[in-house]
Every structure is written in structure tokens, then in C-alpha cells.
Image (cartoon, helix red, strand yellow):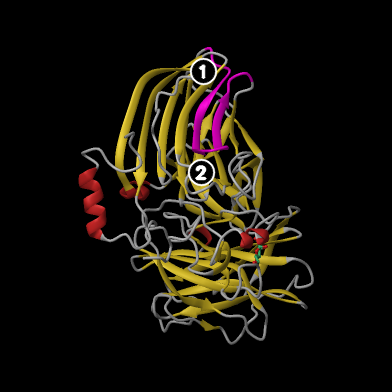
Amino acid sequence: MLQYRERYRPQYHFSAEHGWLNDPNGLVFFNGEYHLFYQHHPFGKTWGPMHWGHAVSKDLVHWQHLPVALYPDHLGTIFSGSAVVDWSDTSGFFGGEPGLVAIFTHSEARGQVQSLAYSTDRGRSWKKYDGNPVLTQFAQEDFRDPKVFWHEPTKQWIMVVAGGKVRIYSSPNLREWVLRSENEIWTECPDLFELAVDGDPRTTKWVLSLGGRKYYIGTFDGERFIPEIGPLPMNYGPDAYAAQTFNDEPRGRRIMISWMNNWEYANSLSSVTDPWNGTMTLPCELSLKTFPEGTRLVQRPVPELQQLRRAHRRFAGQTVRSGANPVAGLRGVQLEIIAEFETGTATEFGIKVRMGGEEETVVGYRTADHVLFLDRNRSGQALSGVYEAPMVAENSRVKMHLFIDWSSLEVFGNDGKVAITSLMFPDPASDGVEVYATGGEVNLVSLDVYELGSIWGEDETTRRKQQCSSHGGMSRLLPK
Ligand code: FRU
């Protein structure tokens, strides 16, 4: 099968079948399905007249493509927005039944306004509301990317919407909106949600996400968000933007997906990937945790992804020093690596992936200034840069959790305290893995590596075969 096997095609990340993709939109769970809509130009590989592409998943891992949900119309093209389940039919669109409502920006030369569309058939077909637009107050400014959710304590819909300021509106019925407050913050794609602190549901805080690049922690009373901490970086890598979290997640989790790209070069990557351009990050669960320096957002890839694990190898209790690679011969491209180091005399240590010829991509830790970094200067074509995150070792331990795909690397440090997300375009043949240390020794406490299956067109039989063979010597993951 050729499709989804093209050069650089992500094998377990979401990408459109063809054409341009940017922001995730309308993330919502309804009737057993997670919905992922996305900014989409179906007729080109660069940004153009925006549509909402659409896919559904039962497990956040395997996605089924559905037809384009929203097309441009006489009010403009369809920019970013969100979707809600209108459980008690406050909108009056559903004859008393629950249904899906999308709240999005209509964008055109005259300005940006907020509009509605609704679906009575589980998102399979969409009708634009004939009273559109429903919110035009700041049409002359940047005024876009409404994220709407139900606020139970005040029993109303809340919209957080971006532009020159972050504005908060409320509504009883999704059709009439009243401005409640403004914050002098420029962002795109804001999100606002409540999280338990340290897993205690009696102690909660609100998080205001600025497009997934930065966040504030504070309070929200149904009218006003008051920041207490921040802004702090949310992702230290170059390629996590326009993040959105799911409404109505069935287990009450707060799960986020970002566009794995950067406006600085996103359009130019149309010369690198074909017939698509644009990928989503893995879904991550967010939580708030207290550290010595204060409360911080923690993000971890959802456990559902573990079903993709195939062949496994474990290395433990090895001393790593210059010139000795304890995982010699290890290869692979679709990999998950979980490593724990105990710092020693080494000034720098870590994991090199996608090695081959002159190419390597480095995830390293520098002990002197307590920095976790991702270096893609020798990663392959198109992109470069070194991206650093401050991360103090905890009890002399440094944990690195890596997801490697054909054109991306997601790194989570110390159980999700820091995240570094990056695209990369190495030669497909660059599949070497190395554990390294310089300036001394480091103890590799453990390293687990899993080959990951594909979410595209990998049938049950292949999957079972792969699982069986993982008990013997298998595939590219293992040394010959
Ligand atoms: C963010 C963004 C949004 C806008 C959309 C247009 O990446 O610029 O502000 O709605 O993309 O595609």
C-alpha cells in the first residue's frame, strides 16, 4: 500500500491525506468518538482559503478521515475555533436532544467575526446557522479563534477569544454573547481550563494557554481570569503551536493537541513533504504539579499510545563514557525511548537518534547549567537549531522520554515537566541510535526502547505477527 508510506510521512502522528493542515480545531468527545477538526486547504500544500478538515477516533491514536466539515461561504473563510456538545439544547438547534455545535471565526477582508455551525448526525454533516455571524464586536481588529466551554458553576457558555486582547464572553445559548472581561495579551488560539493541583480535585487552578506557547496559572470566576503565575513557556521546542484541549473528555482528563509546526517556515515545507504539509503532535494529558519553584504545568503523552508498542528491548545499569555506546547496533525510526540517567562526572550526556552518514539529532543534558536540549543542526534537510529547556535533576536523576517518527521528535523531560517538540527531515536511511557521555561518566539506570506500529493501514494480522516476532530477534530495532 503506497498511501501514507511517502518519504517523511508520519506513521503514528495525524496528518491530512493530502493538502495543507494547520491548527487543530473543534476538539470534542461525543458518542464514543473523539473529533479532530483542523485548519485545512484541501487544494494546495500551502496556506490558502481555510476549510475545516475532519477526522474521528475511538482511542485518540487511530484516526478515520471524514469529508471536509466546513467550507468557506459568503461570510468568509473558516478560521480556527472549537466545538461543544450542547447537552440540553440551549441553542435550540436540536429539538431537545443533545448535538454538536462548532463555534469558529469567519474571516474576510472586512474583518473577523464569530459564527456557528451545528450537526444533528454525530458530526457527519454540518449546517451553518442562518443567524451568522453571532459576534461582530471587534471585527475591525484581530478577533478570532473562539474556544467555548460550559461553565457549570455559573451555568453558562464561556468563550475565550483572541486578537489584540484575550477577551472572555458568556452566553446562555451560544447565539447571544456578552463581553465579561479583557486581558492585555496578544495571542492566537487561546484556551482556558481548570485543573486539579497535585491530583487533588478540591484544590483547582485555571490555566490560560496562549496558543500552546506560553501559559498562565490563575483563577476564573465565570467572568474574569486573574493570573497568579506566568507567563511560562509551555513547550521549549520550535514546533508546537495553536494548541487546543478537548471538551467533554469522557474520563475528565484535559488532553491537548498542537499543530507540530511553526509559521516561520511552515509554508516552505511544502517543497519537502508530498502530497501533504502539516502534522499534529501526539495528544498529551495536562496536569498541575507543585515543585520547589512553584506550581507548573506537566504534560504527558496519553497512555492509549502504549498500544502501538511492538518489539521491546531494555538496557539497565550501564556506565556510559566517551567512546562507549551501550546500545551499539540499535536502530529504528518509529521508536519510543524511555531513559533514566543518574548524573556522574559527565558534563553532557544523552541520546542521539536518526543517525546515519553525517546526520544525527541529539537529545542531551548539560549538567553545569541544568539544561535539557534538542539539537537538530545535523538532522537533515530544511531545518536547524538548538532548543534548550531548564531542568534541574531530581535526586540526581534525569529522565528522557522520546517519540521518534519519520519527520519529528517529541521529547518529555522528567515525567513531562518540560516538553521539546521538533520537526526534522533526516534521510529515511538514518536510523541509528546511540547513548553518549562526554567529559566523564554517567550511569544509565535504565533504557526501554519500543518499536512503534503504524496507525495507517496496518492491519490486525501484521500487528499480531509483529507482536509474536518480538519475542524472537526482530526487525530493525534490534542489533543483528
Ligand atoms: C494560528 C492561526 C489562527 C487562525 C488560523 C488561520 O495558527 O493564525 O489565529 O485562526 O491560524 O488558519
Residue 66 visible in image: yes
Residue 291: where, in percent of width, then height? 53, 29
Q: Name the residue type under label 2.
A: Glu
* Magenta run includes residue 350: yes
* Camera-side residue of 467 and 62: 467
10 Å crowding of disc 1: few (<14), some (14-19), many (20+):
some
Residue identified by numbered label 1: 322
Q: Reply above or below: 285 against 100.
A: above
How far apart marks 1 and 2 lie (CA) works out to 26 Å
Which residue is situated farthest in the front direction here? 357
Residue 53: where, in percent of width, then height? 52, 71
Mark 1 or mark 2: which comes first in sequence?
A: 1
Q: Secondary structure at mark 2?
A: strand
Q: The C terminus lies in which quarter of the figure? A: top left
* Camera-side residue of 120 and 137: 120
Magenta segment: 345-368
> Is residue 313 rendered to the left or right of residue 339?
left
> Is residue 360 rendered to the left or right of residue 161?
left
At x 40% / y 23%, what residue is drawn?
A: 326
Q: The N terminus lies in which quarter of the figure? A: bottom left
10 Å crowding of disc 2: few (<14), some (14-19), many (20+):
many
Which quadrant of the figure shows ligand 1?
bottom right
Residue 143: where, in percent of width, then height? 71, 67
Q: Reply above or below: 289 against 115.
A: above
Q: Name the residue type under label 1.
A: Ser
Prevailing secondary structure of the magenta residues: strand
**Label for residue 66?**
none
Closer mark to the observer between disc 1 and disc 2: 1
At x 45% / y 37%, what residue is drawn?
A: 432
* Camera-side residue of 89 and 211: 211
Residue 244's image quarter?
A: bottom right
Residue identified by numbered label 2: 410
